[in-house]
Amino acid sequence: MPVTVRIPAVLRSVTAGKDQVAVEAADVSEVLSRLDELYPGVKDRLCDAGGKVRRFVNIYVNREDVRFLNGVGTALKEGDVVSIIPAIAGG
C-alpha cells in the first residue's frame, strides 16, 4: 500500500532534491526503513543509535502527531500522508 512521505528541506540533499516520495509501508517504522533503503543515511538523521526517533524530529500521519497515536508503530493505509518535520527553535 503506497503512502506519500513529505520530505523537509533539510533532508532533500539526501533524497536527490525530492520534496515527497511514495513508499510501500504498513506502519511508520517501515516508512523509515524504506526511506533508508532508497536513500541511505536518511534514517541516521531521523533516529538515534538505538533506533528511536530523535527528539527534534516530528512525524505526522495525516496531520496527527504519531506521539499521540501509536508512535512509529502507527498503522498506515493506502493514500496516507506521512510528514517529517524537524523542530525549529529560535531565540
Image (cartoon, rainbow, N blue to C red):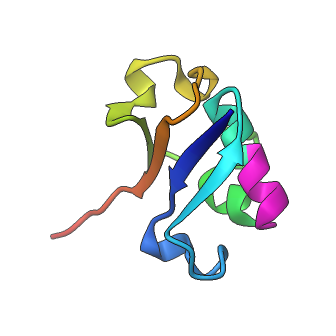
Residue 25: which quarter of the image? top right
Range covered by the magenta-colored residues = 33-40
Q: Is residue 53 visible?
A: no
Q: Is residue 37 magenta?
A: yes
Magenta segment's dominant SS is helix
Instruction: Kindly identify the residue that appears in the image at 50 percent across and 63 percent down.
Output: 7
Residue 22 image position (x, y, % from top left)? 63, 53
Q: Residue at x 20, y 68 (%)?
A: 90
Task: Report the side of 52 relative to 50 (left or right).
Answer: left
Q: Quadrant of residue 50?
A: top right
Total marks in image: 0
What residue is rendered at 48% in x and 74% in y? 10
> x and y percent of residue 79 in the render?
51, 36
- As rendered, which of 8 and 50 lies closer to the eye? 8
Tell me: 88 left or right of 68.
left
Q: Is residue 85 left or right of residue 15?
A: left
State the image coordinates of residue 49 (x, y, percent, origin top left): 76, 48
Residue 4 in sight: yes
Residue ID at (66%, 76%): 14
